[in-house]
Amino acid sequence: MPYSVRLPSLVCDFFKLTETAGRGTGESLAQFPVQAGEYVLADRGYSTTLGIHHVVSAGGQVTVRVNTGALVLQTAQGAPFDLLAALTALRRAGIVESWSPPSGGPGSDRGAGVGVCDPKNGRSDPDSA
């Protein structure tokens, strides 16, 4: 059941009862209506190219924990983006980096920039970069 809340109030602003089997039943950001200017925060179950592009194409922004098994990342030239190599270049905890536009995948007409918080400590502190 797709369910979303508003922060910081934690008031439910959307939910949808879906079928248990068949097309359109999976966890996806595409299940949610998105308004221009909205900011979506989602866990790795929503880390798919289709869902992220749904949010971006509606004028929203999204932060999602990466699921490397489901999210297709590509360079602007369409080559696979080596996320592990990019993360390895982050030498100390607390570093925040971004690469643009490594997103896309089959059928996408627009990339979305990707920002990464150092996974070693989970903090995003621009002052320490």
Image: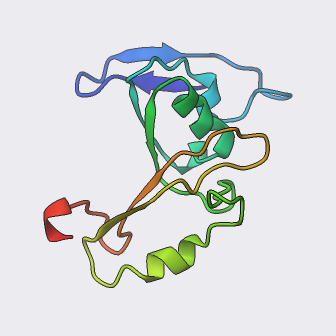
Q: Is residue 109 left or right of residue 64?
A: right
Where residue 31 appears, x then y in whole percent? 63, 24
Quarter of the picture containing the C terminus is bottom left
Q: Residue at x 72, y 50 (%)?
A: 105
Q: Residue at x 46, y 82 (%)?
A: 88
Q: Examine the rendered structure and indicate whether residue 59 appears above or below residue 64.
A: above
Q: Residue at x 36, y 65 (%)?
A: 97
Quadrant of the rendered image containing residue 118: bottom left
Q: Is residue 124 left or right of residue 108?
A: left
Q: Is residue 45 left or right of residue 121?
A: right
Where residue 57 appears, x then y in whole percent? 57, 28
Where residue 46 appears, x then y in whole percent? 58, 42
Front-most of 13 and 58? 58
In this picture the colour scheme is: rainbow
Where residue 69 appears, x then y in whole percent? 68, 61
Residue, far right: 22
Q: Examine the rendered structure and indicate whether residue 36 appears above or below residue 83.
A: above
Residue, far front: 77
Label total for image:
0
Q: Residue at x 50, y 20 (%)?
A: 34
Q: Examine the rendered structure and indicate whether residue 89 appears above or below residue 11.
A: below
Quarter of the picture containing the N terminus is top right
Quadrant of the rendered image containing residue 27: top right
